[in-house]
């Protein structure tokens, strides 16, 4: 069995990334088979439970209030609406629902209580529940765990060095602190990043160092290709080639053998052959549904046709880890602390973010 290493260096990871393609694919597929059934792919549905109006300045994100994009914002969805969407997702083969809210961080109060109720509701449908709500404290992570949360998503996005070129409203350490808070519970960690934001290969390797040296490594690592949205600071970025995506997936698989590697944003730009290569290289999870929060994604029927063509099967829920129990709100051991946490605000200037903001105010 390939050992799980927590001491990968950038140089070593770059060495893997730059292997001749056939060697890279062979290595990645071999590691993949040691740790996973290569014909099983986990299917998640991403649901935007609160869209737009975010105070952060992530250069890739159309939901940041400061940029002028075509996103239609909405308030927090009702629990009933979320339940109906989860049932639809389940019927179409998803084993996990990931709920995303365009928040900087979680604040205790009615809205968080409503999210906790959504978690309880979906867990009772026997689906894995994931949330991505921004930064969270240990108490908030404990309350999510008690409600039956299976995974918390909090992406590192890129390397620590390049992070300061993408986001000025929080620091890399805030991300790591949130991941550490999640780790104090039994909730699994989902954390990955985006390629195609103008970063160097060194930054891609740097992100994989940051993720693989976590102990334990994240149970799930989404690899996104930037979807350059008009009005965002990164609107003019050229799309990454499929070969870069394959290299990134294969490298992630090799440095994090047990992790679910998820093909995330950018799949609409990939051919069926390209996606098949990614599965061969170790991707074993996808997001289904025609929208990924706000950007387009292949139709679920198209995905199921591709699965049939390749002989892939959607993974059942709770294969990797048992279903958490749901504790009802009245029985909670972790009371709301009324936290309004203050996370870092470095607020350094990022020229292209400032330009996009200026453009949007005209
Ligand atoms: S990525 Fe998340 S935190 Fe950043 S602007 Fe978008 S919604 Fe806000």
Image (cartoon, helix red, strand yellow):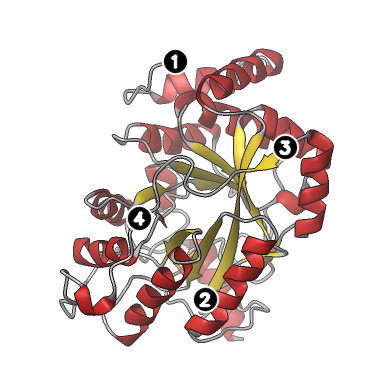
Q: Nearer the viewer, mark 3 or mark 4?
A: 4
According to the picture, the residue beneath numbered tag 4 turns out to be 324
Q: Is residue 340 visible?
A: no
Q: Nearer the viewer, mark 1 or mark 3?
A: 3
How packed mark 1 is, by other alpha carbons closer than 10 Å (few <14, some 14-19, many 20 or more), is: some
**Cβ(mark 4) to ligand 1 < 8 Å?**
no
Instruction: Give the spatial CA distance, label 2 vs label 1.
Output: 39 Å
Query: Nearest the camera: 53 or 256?
Result: 256
According to the picture, the residue beneath numbered tag 1 turns out to be 2
Percent across and percent down for residue 110 are: 32, 87
The residue tagged with tag 3: helix, strand or loop?
loop
Q: Is 307 on the left-hand or right-hand side of 321? A: right
- Reply above or below: 165 against 218: below
- Residue 169, quarter of the rendered image: bottom left
For the C terminus, the quadrant is bottom right
According to the picture, the residue beneath numbered tag 2 turns out to be 49
The residue tagged with tag 1: helix, strand or loop?
loop
Instruction: Give the spatial CA distance, label 1 vs label 3.
Output: 24 Å
How packed mark 4 is, by other alpha carbons closer than 10 Å (few <14, some 14-19, many 20 or more), is: many
Percent across and percent down for residue 241 are: 73, 39
């Amino acid at each position: 069995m390939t050992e799980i290493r927590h001491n990968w260096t950038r140089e070593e990871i770059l060495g893997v990334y730059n292997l001749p393609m056939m060697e890279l694919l062979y290595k990645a597929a071999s590691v993949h088979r040691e740790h996973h059934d290569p014909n099983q792919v986990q299917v998640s549905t991403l649901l935007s439970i609160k869209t737009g109006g975010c105070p952060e300045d992530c250069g890739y994100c159309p939901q940041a209030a400061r940029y002028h994009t075509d996103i239609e914002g909405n308030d927090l969805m009702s629990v009933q609406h979320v339940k109906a969407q989860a049932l639809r997702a389940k019927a179409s083969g998803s084993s996990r629902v990931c709920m995303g809210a365009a928040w900087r961080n979680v604040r205790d109060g009615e809205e968080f209580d409503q999210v906790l109720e959504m978690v309880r509701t979906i867990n009772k449908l026997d689906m894995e529940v994931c949330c991505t709500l921004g930064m969270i404290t240990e108490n908030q992570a404990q309350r999510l765990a008690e409600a039956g949360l299976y995974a918390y998503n909090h992406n590192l996005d890129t390397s620590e060095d390049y992070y300061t070129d993408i986001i000025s409203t929080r620091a890399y350490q805030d991300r790591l602190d949130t991941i550490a808070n999640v780790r104090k519970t039994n909730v699994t960690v989902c954390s990955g990043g985006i390629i195609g934001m103008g970063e160097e290969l060194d930054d891609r390797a740097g992100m994989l160092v940051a993720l693989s040296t976590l102990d334990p490594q994240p149970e799930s690592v989404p690899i996104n290709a930037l979807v350059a949205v008009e009005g965002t600071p990164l609107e003019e970025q050229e799309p990454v080639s499929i070969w870069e995506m394959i290299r990134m997936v294969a490298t992630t698989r090799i440095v994090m053998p047990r992790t679910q590697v998820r093909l995330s944003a950018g799949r609409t730009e990939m051919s069926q052959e390209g996606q098949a290569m990614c599965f061969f290289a170790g991707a074993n999870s996808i997001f289904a549904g025609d929208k990924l929060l706000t950007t387009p994604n292949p139709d679920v029927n198209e995905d199921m046709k591709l699965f049939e063509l390749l002989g892939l099967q959607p993974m059942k829920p709770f294969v990797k880890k048992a279903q958490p129990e749901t504790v009802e709100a009245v029985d909670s051991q972790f009371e709301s602390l009324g936290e309004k946490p203050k996370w870092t605000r470095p607020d350094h200037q990022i020229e292209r973010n400032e330009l996009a903001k200026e453009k949007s105010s005209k």
